[in-house]
Image (cartoon, rainbow, N blue to C red):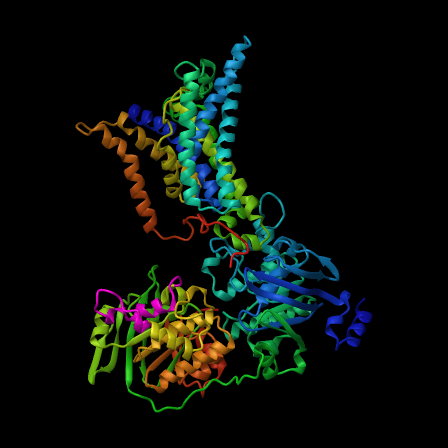
Amino acid sequence: MESPAHTDRRAQEQDLTEDDPGNLAVSMEHVSKSFGKVLANKDVQLQLRQGEILALLGENGSGKTTLMNMLSGIYFPDYGDIHVHGRKVTIKSPKDAFDLGIGMIHQHFKLIPVLSAAENIVLGQPGGVVVSRRSLNADIRELATRYGFEIDPAKKVYDMSVSEKQTVEIVKVLYRGADILILDEPTAVLTPHETDKLFAVLRNMKEDGKSIVIITHKLHEVLAISDRVEILRKGEFIGVVETAQTDQSQLTEMMVGRPVSLRIDRPKLPRGEERLTVQGLTCLSSYGVKVVDDVGFSAYGGEILGIAGIAGSGQKELCEAIVGLYPATRGSVVYRGTKDGAIVREQLLGRRPKELTRKGVSMAFVPEDRLGMGLVASMDITDNVMLRSYRDNHSVFVDRKKPQTLAGHLIEDLEIVASGPEAIVGRLSGGNVQKVLLGREIARSPGVLIVAYPVRGLDINSSYKIYDLLNEQKRKGAAVIFVGEDLDVLMEISDRLMVLCGGRVSGTVDPQKATKEEVGLMMIQLAGSEAVAS
Amino acid sequence: MLDTTVALLVAAVLAGTPLLLGALGEILTERSGNLNLGVEGMMFMGAITGLIGSFFYEQAVIGAGLAPSGALSALIALLVSFLAGAFGALIYGFLTITLRANQNVTGLILTIFGTGFGNFFGEYFGLKAGGYIAVSKATKSAFAPINIPYLSDLPVVGKLFFSYNWMVYFAIALAIAMAWFFFKSRVGLNLRAVGEDPAAADAAGINVSRYRYFATVIGGGICGIGGMYMCMVTTSGVWVHGCVSGYGWLAVALVIFATWRPLRGMVLAVIFGGLMVMRMYISIPGLPAQIYEMVPYVITILVLVITSIRQSKEHAMPASCGLNYFREDR
């Protein structure tokens, strides 16, 4: 079967839609899906060949995940045909997908925290009345050695690191005998080192004859791992290219729809005066564990200080402690600035935000949870803008004029796609929500601007707009603290990069001199010590 | 002193059994992610239907000129009360699982409905029967304490372990079986997964709706049996207006206290039962009876405060409990 089909495929290499059905693991044709009025997929096609790694590339909201959810039975297509191994199929539920050998590793892990790895893996599987832990553990170890995983079957999921959880997800799918694997943004939460390990596992699986779809928007990863790339844009099929015959700029152009410069600007400015001094800052979690451990740094005006680290290394608590939202047990945070020409120098810890604002401390914080902490989803843009400024107005009635004007300016200047200042924030797309939040914060010209994961979930266009806004604040002399997850971005935009590991500072580097690998290593171990997280 | 202690313990077990049954039904329900606050209502439904079932069976047999069988009468009460509780839970399940109505509101409504259902039919059939409904001696003796030769006659031990009616042993067996089901069996593992995270369970190929329906309906049936215990044992086969009143809520509190574990529920039900009957065994001079009656509820409030302070991932409420599941939610 192998060789004739192989030559056949060769002959038709150029015409990908006419691929021999017998050689295709999956073929989706004319698939459409809408949610209410939103058309998530419009007449999309996808061909996955046997034993290849196909990258599904597209911006956020381009319908990649929706398309794959239809293959894994989470959604049911409104229209279109799905063929698996040349046979037409109807996939109504995840169970149907498993029966066809399709397994999906979701971006948000579908694991039960209170259950162990083994229990999560065996979930929903047919078998005897009682689950035999011994034979189950043996099966899991066998899979682990075959593909090169590290896994402890008895470990509870809530005790696991992100990469361990991902391993459980992958083993879960393999245990079910899947030969078609779909990975949704698998590297989004991994360190570079963990990504390399994952890619090694994926290559082992490919060798073993598995067909793999990897959903991503990271171009260098597409080029590193895939055989072919399919590009979606705004729910529509754009094209398929052989990875060997393409490059980053072609892929970006297909993805965005027009040529885009992928360089992030880093204006060179003389370092300004010290704006924020953090010393020995320590915070405890509700379980009494040190989540921020003796952290100290300075932030200067006219500079972007990047903060890198794997998820949950204390970034959230650090930011919140500085702005007074998280209790600090020890340390000091001193703000320096001016107000009406007078010098302001204030200790921030243990003080109330209102009092600090009166004393002239001008700080802005853009939290990672935009709609939870940053904005009120059910209110319109004007009211959200007003939340920050209504105290300035001492009349009995609120003054809506000024915030409304500001909201109008924001919509215009930041290219926010909204019907007007009366648009409800919760109904805007992620990028526009972020622009409202960031726009409101920078409108007050803060001396210190702290942004946590400002481009998470944003597409390329919005992301670059946000980078521009941050650079503009830097030019205006603000000290910008940028907590990010994408190391490439952090390396490009930051003037200095501080790396956190397990709540401690493992080092501060000059991103123009350090390599990504060095920073990646600092993320998983403190300088001069053993690795603390794998 | 020893006699009083033994008597208190025996009374505590007897008073704790309906709480245990109600709690077991609710544990099964909540483990599937359905917070059914209608326990009280389902217990009322089980109480009245169980009693009426036995009553009509006896009437029919006596009408035919035969002697009613106590065992058969008890079996009918068990089945009918299970079905009535299950029916209440089915209404709840249809509203919350299929129509995705708010679980809290639906549960409260079920409590109001069941209370009315029980009291209405209790009065109605009481009037028709000429004043009140009461089962005959045959059925009453079926719910009397068992007597195992030698064992029941042992001093202390006999009283403590072998002097109860069959429903006490039934409840204990049910608790043990449920513990095995949750933590050892495959279906139990799947059920726990549904209660923790229905989306994850769904992605693992588990039919979330089916699991929720089965757990909720069977759980409701068990609550119904708990209600039947109230009017067969506690009030000795006579319908007393509002006989369940309060027990269903204590059962819900017991579920939290027991951290959703059947075996803990078994032990704690005895403690709750003891608190309810304490005033008859321990008298503190000058302490009004009302204070005694308050104790179980005060303890419940304290327990709720303590359990909400304690933070543990293992002993917490099933994570999705109270939330309806819709696969295509975005």
Q: Residue at x 54, y 8 (%)?
A: B65
Q: Is residue A263 above or below residue A189?
A: below
**Quarter of the image containing the N terminus of chain A?**
bottom right
Q: Which residues are magenta?
A: A377-403
Residue in the picture at 41% in, 25% down: B120
Say above or below: A85 vs B36.
Answer: below
Residue at left 43%, top 64%? A426
Q: Is residue B37 in view? A: no
Is residue A19 positioned above or below A126 on the image? below
Q: Is residue B74 visible?
A: yes
Q: Position of residue B7 (x, y in %)?
A: 32, 24
Q: Nearer the viewer, residue B312 or A269?
A: A269
Q: Position of residue A167 (x, y in %)?
A: 55, 63
Residue B234: horizontal and vertical position, in percent?
Answer: 38, 24
**Quarter holding residue A41:** bottom right
Q: Position of residue B280 (x, y in %)?
A: 27, 25
The extreme front residue here reads: A401
Q: Between residues B92 and A330, which one lies in front from this camera angle?
A: B92
Please count the marks in the image.
0
Q: Is residue B292 above or below residue A466?
A: above
At horizontal 42% and vertical 71% (from top left) the residue drawn is A420
Q: Is A387 covered by the magenta stretch?
A: yes
Which image quadrant for residue B131?
top left
Magenta-drawn stretch contains B279: no
| Horizontal relation, residue A480 to residue A94: left or right | left
Which residue lies most toward the right here?
Answer: A4
Picture quadrant of residue B111: top left
